[in-house]
């Protein structure tokens, strides 16, 4: 099973009044990492939309905050595919600091028809690549 690493540096605007990363920013970090993981597999969100008329949307997130990140910390977002169905897939994403997990989430993502707003089959080229990543 492939794990994709995406480096993040914590900047001032990522932190809250207490000097730690604001909770919603972990979701932003993971969103960026997912986009870069797709790009590393040869898919860009905009190209998927243009070529197939589908977009990928988040349906469900389960997240656990384990330890804080602070200004100037160097983080790694690790992403991996857990499962795939006809219209959806599940990923696990971890934010790692100094070799230890500080944030862990699973996210259910669904392919949606861009015009009708309803679930759509995952394009075969995407599904085949996803399955290969999960080997």
Image (spheres, rainbow, N blue to C red):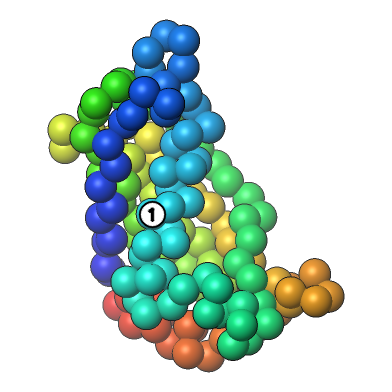
Quadrant where the C terminus sits is bottom left
Residue furthest to the top: 18
Q: Nearer the viewer, residue 106 or 56?
A: 56
Q: Nearer the viewer, residue 117 or 85?
A: 117
In the depicted structure, whether residue 12 falls above or below residue 51:
above
Horizontal arrangement in the rendering, residue 123 relative to residue 102 (left or right): right
| Residue 91 in sight in this render | yes
Quarter of the N terminus within the rendering:
bottom left
> Where does residue 125 sit, x and y in percent of width and height?
47, 90
Q: Is residue 78 above or below residue 55?
A: above
Picture residue at 42% right of the left edge, 43% below the top: 29
Residue at horizontal 28 percent and vertical 61 percent from the top: 4
Return the residue nearer the eye: 9 or 1. 9
Q: Is residue 114 above or below residue 4?
A: below
**Element on which disc 1 rests:** helix
Give the x, y percent position of residue 81. Answer: 40, 65
Q: Going 47% across and 24% down the picture, which residue do you hit?
A: 22
Residue 49 relative to residue 12: left or right: right
* Label 1 neighbour load within 10 Å: few <14, some 14-19, many 20+: many
In this rendering, position of residue 91 left or right of residue 61? left
Q: Residue furthest bottom?
A: 124
According to the image, label 1 marks what residue?
Answer: 33
Residue drawn 43% across the image and 52% down it = 32
Q: Position of residue 131 (x, y in %)?
A: 40, 80
């Amino acid at each position: 099973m492939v794990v994709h690493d995406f480096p993040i540096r914590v900047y001032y605007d990522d932190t809250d009044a207490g000097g730690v990363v604001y909770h919603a920013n972990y979701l932003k970090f993971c969103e960026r990492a997912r986009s870069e993981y797709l790009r590393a597999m040869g898919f860009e969100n905009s190209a998927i939309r243009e070529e197939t008329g589908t977009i990928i949307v988040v349906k469900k997130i389960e997240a656990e905050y384990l330890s804080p990140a602070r200004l100037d910390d160097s983080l790694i977002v690790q992403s991996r595919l857990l499962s795939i169905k006809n219209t959806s897939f599940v990923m696990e994403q971890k934010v790692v600091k100094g070799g230890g997990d500080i944030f862990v989430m699973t996210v259910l993502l669904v392919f949606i028809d861009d015009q009708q707003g309803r679930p759509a089959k995952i394009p075969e080229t995407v599904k085949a690549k996803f399955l290969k990543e999960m080997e």
